[in-house]
Amino acid sequence: MQRKLTNRYNIMTSFLISIAALVLGYMIYGRVIERIFGPDDRKTPAVAHPDGVDYIAMPTWKVFMIQFLNIAGTGPIFGAIMGAWFGPASYLWIVLGCIFAGSVHDYLSGMMSLRHDGAGLPELVGKYMGNTMRIIMLVFSMMLLLMVGAVFVYSPASILAGLGGNEIMWFVVIFIYYIIATLLPINKIIGKIYPIFAIALIFMALGLFVALIIKMPTLPEVWHIGNMDAWITAQTHNGTDLLGIEEYLTANTIFPAMFITIACGAISGFHATQSPLMARCIKSEKLGRPIFYGSMITEGMVALVWAAVSSWFFYSGGWREVMPQDAVNEFLAQVGNTDGKSLIQYFNAPAVVKLVCSSWLGVAGGILAMLGVVAAPITTGDTALRSARLIIADFLKYDQKPMTKRLMIAVPMFAAVLVLLIWQITNPNGFNTLWLYFGWSNQTLSVFTLWTITIFLYKYKKCYWVTLIPAIFMTAVSLTFIIQQIF
């Protein structure tokens, strides 16, 4: 039987302080980072030489929304939900990581791209770390972006197949959309539909935030880190631990696993491949802080909301409230079986999104949940492939205005994604394998980016400590994780 936790444990104190900290982080530390870089009135690439395809000056609000959706997708939702397994430590990582690492990483990589004519990440790495690193970064970036394209076809197709048709049909539909969105000018599809999806993602987070304020549920607090016994005890059935947290943490220690699991919302190397897309669409350097730093802070807030929601779902028995009683009984009936699943095994991230949104936000929530688990992954995939096209074009010095040259890059690129997709479908553990390497390569990419920015700041006699410290920390995270996987 579930035990009720009394309010002596909390009333969302850590969550509310974390939200306030992100706002202050943008207002104070964001301005510090802006002054370190020193934006000025020079012409941006979109103003200096628009090409009607990738270099197109767009309204600031639209650039912000596209940047936010580009870097977010399902990352701050799924990552925060899975991060709940590490308890309230996830709050600390999201807040500190977002303010002092992720937002700094996104702002400075975006501004460096802006200063270097909209250059992609491998070109920036090559300029400041040498040609060998440029080649390594090119290969590494392409591997990551192609994996993103393949990974984010699978889950939307599976969900859509449940509504009608079959997975193969939806694979084809999504893949065709990828091709169209990657090849057409950025203002034709991405510029028109991305702001709508971004607004929907923000409204979903706002709706859940309001619901949390109204409910004021009892949640684990940061002072419960290392002492979660009361919460584990509260989620038991006939003496059996329902959560499965202790077993999970035995196999996945907080360091480095939490810092790999929660990427979007804290720091994500993938963002550095997306910022150049918007660096080619900004009208003024002085808009960099609200667009690059601001969109990352916004993503951090979305992650915090989902961290609180998933904490309520798993630790405070929220799962019982959002499911019909027969479904609750079905879960409890299988707990004692040999192959019985714990809460964190039984409810994956998409299931949590669907259950909570439908229960708390009604019909509108169901629609927003569908956007979150279907549209957001697809938009992440197509911008990843667009970034891949531009990175290859920069390397080969291919003008991307003619469609024929876009096709020369896109055709072999899509062939590679198709191979990965087929392997993922035919391999029983294909998705999980790709996701594991995606998570590690994503954070490793942030390491390359942070070291490049550090060298840039050092070269121009600016305060390089703001990226040196995060660079050292993320290097330790990535190395520790891959060593653990090998040994």
Image (tube, rainbow, N blue to C red):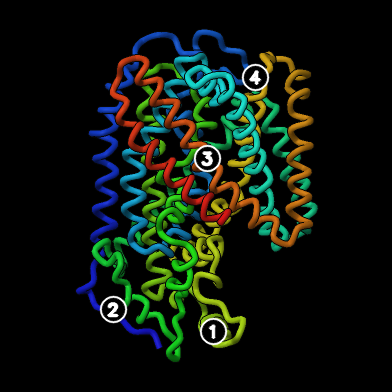
In x, y percent, where is residue 328?
A: 51, 82
**Which of the marked residues, 3 or 1, is nearer the chain's N terminus?**
3
The residue that disc 1 covers is 335
- In the rendered structure, which amino acid carries the disc numbered 1? Val
Q: Which amino acid, by three-letter code, is at mark 4?
A: Phe
User: Which image quadrant is residue 53 in?
Assistant: top right
Question: N-terminal of the two: label 2 or label 4?
Answer: 2
Residue 472 x/y as whole percent: 38, 38
Task: Locate the C terminus by quadrant.
Answer: bottom right
Residue linked to disc 3: 196
Residue in view at x 38 percent, y 42 percent: 473
Q: CA distance from mark 2 to mark 3?
A: 40 Å
Q: Nearer the viewer, mark 1 or mark 2?
A: 1
User: In terms of sequence position, does the residue under pointer 1 or pointer 2 come before the other?
Assistant: 2
- Tell me the element at label 1: helix
- Residue receiving disc 2: 5
Question: What SS does tag 3 mark?
Answer: helix
Task: Give the label, 1 or 4, closer to the camera.
Answer: 4
Marker count (numbered) = 4
* Label 2–label 3 contact, CB within 8 A: no
- Mark 2 or 4, which is nearer the eye? 4
Residue linked to disc 4 = 395
Mark 1: few/some/many CA within 10 Å (<14, 14-19, 20+):
some
- Residue at screen point 60% across, 41% down: 379
Q: Earlier in the sequence, mark 4 or mark 3?
A: 3
Amino acid on which disc 3 is placed:
Ile
Question: With respect to residue 284, does 342 lie above or below?
Answer: below
Query: Which mark is nearer the camera, 2 or 3?
Result: 2
Mark 4 secondary-structure assignment:
helix
